[in-house]
Image: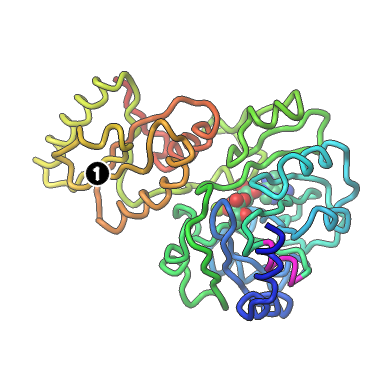
Amino acid sequence: STDTIEGLKRQPEIIRAAKLLREGGLVAFPTETVYGLGADATSQAAVAQIFEAKGRPSDNPLIVHLGSPEQLAKWVEGVPSVAKICMKHFCPGPLTLVLPHNGQIADNVTAGLDTVAVRFPSHPVAMALLQVADIPVAAPSANRSGKPSPTQAQHVWHDLSGRFHVLLDGGNAGVGIESTVLDITGDVPMLLRPGGITLEQLRDVLGDVEVDPNLHSEKSKPRSPGMKYRHYAPSGEMFLVHGEPLKVVGRVNRMIKEDVRQGKKVGVLTTEERKHYFKQANHVIACGSRSDPESVARGLYDALRTFDQEKIDVIYAETFPECGIYTSVMNRMRKAAEGRMIRV
Ligand code: TXA
Ligand code: MG
């Protein structure tokens, strides 16, 4: 609420972090999707530290975070009506808009493209920080490049300790997967990355929305440069196991038995409804409840990180129906599994 944000804006931690941002520092902060690693988006030097800290390829542009919708006009060529409609319905919230920029954002934020990705996070700590700093803040997810995005402050600490100036702890990220990236430079809006706002929600408000055809193919070049990199991958080899529930359970248990016999440590990524079926695995994680898709999104990245901590060699994961937020969950799970899918 407005009261909460006004209260946060007076907190010394927030004031100090905002000052650090203005002075060119690196601030890790919570958003409603995942934690971000922020720097002044108008400063090439400040932004360069982000790529350095994350080990991120420089051809992968960053999202600019703003504290209020009125600020958008300062950084883009113009604010089209589709942007206004999106902002009215979804901002602040987990939606990122891609628009032509006006040249005022540092070149390394946009990777030299003529467009910029902008979003208005709804997490009260992020909103307070952005409003106090009063500058556009470039922020990718605050993980080492290739690792699952951080949904808790301790994940940021694990990946990046010593590589930023401050970390604001805002508890668990509520959505748990990144924002939806929507390109609104063309005649028809195009979904570049599925995320916290679903395609169904976008179509309800905007009518026609296309989906980047490259999202589903491994070979061609996606229009959202970040989608081409190995991502979200746990250290163990992950397999999605797709099919009728009882067949999935039978097949996974046979594979577990064989893997354990070979001395491998086996993990199962499942849900509350099914976790009791996999007694022989070394580590079973219910990352949420199947009947509550939001809970699965919220628990996914922490589960992937836990398998790493437990030094799991092979992970079997159940799949989800491709609609609503499960579309975004499945996008991340396919990446984590690097496309490995067993159909039963
Ligand atoms: O939820 C989120 O969006 C989080 C939080 C921290 O806000 N941020 C995040 O940033 O996920 P990052 O850097 O991990 O992902 C940014 C995505 C990448 O896929 C990148 O390629 C795409 O946005 N992107 C950035 N600028 C773009 C542009 N001008 N055109 C197309 N895609 C762009
Ligand atoms: Mg990321």
Question: Can you say whether 152 is above or below 191 in the image?
Answer: below
Q: Quadrant of the C terminus?
A: top left
Residue at left offset 43%, top offset 40%: 296
Which x, y percent locates residue 201? 66, 31
Q: Quadrant of residue 73?
A: bottom right
Say few, some or many: other residues with alpha carbon within 10 Å of mark 1 (under 14 / 14 to 19 / 20 or more). many
Q: Is residue 298 left or right of residue 199?
A: left
Q: Quadrant of residue 22?
A: bottom right
Residue at left offset 24%, top offset 48%: 313
Total numbered circles? 1
Q: Is residue 284 left or right of residue 28?
A: left
Prevailing secondary structure of the magenta residues: helix
Q: Quadrant of the N terminus?
A: bottom right
Residue at left offset 64%, top offset 62%: 126
Question: What segment is highlighted magenta in the picture?
Answer: 127-133
Q: Is residue 33 left or right of residue 47?
A: left
Closer to the camera, 308 or 9?
Answer: 9
Which x, y percent locates residue 100? 83, 47
| Colour mapping used in the image | rainbow
For label 1, the residue is: 284
Please state which amino acid type lies under the numbered disc 1: Val
Residue at left offset 32%, top offset 29%: 241
Which x, y percent locates residue 320? 42, 29
Closer to the camera, 73 or 50?
Answer: 73
SS label for mark 1: strand
Q: Quadrant of residue 130?
A: bottom right
Q: Is residue 148 left or right of residue 28?
A: left
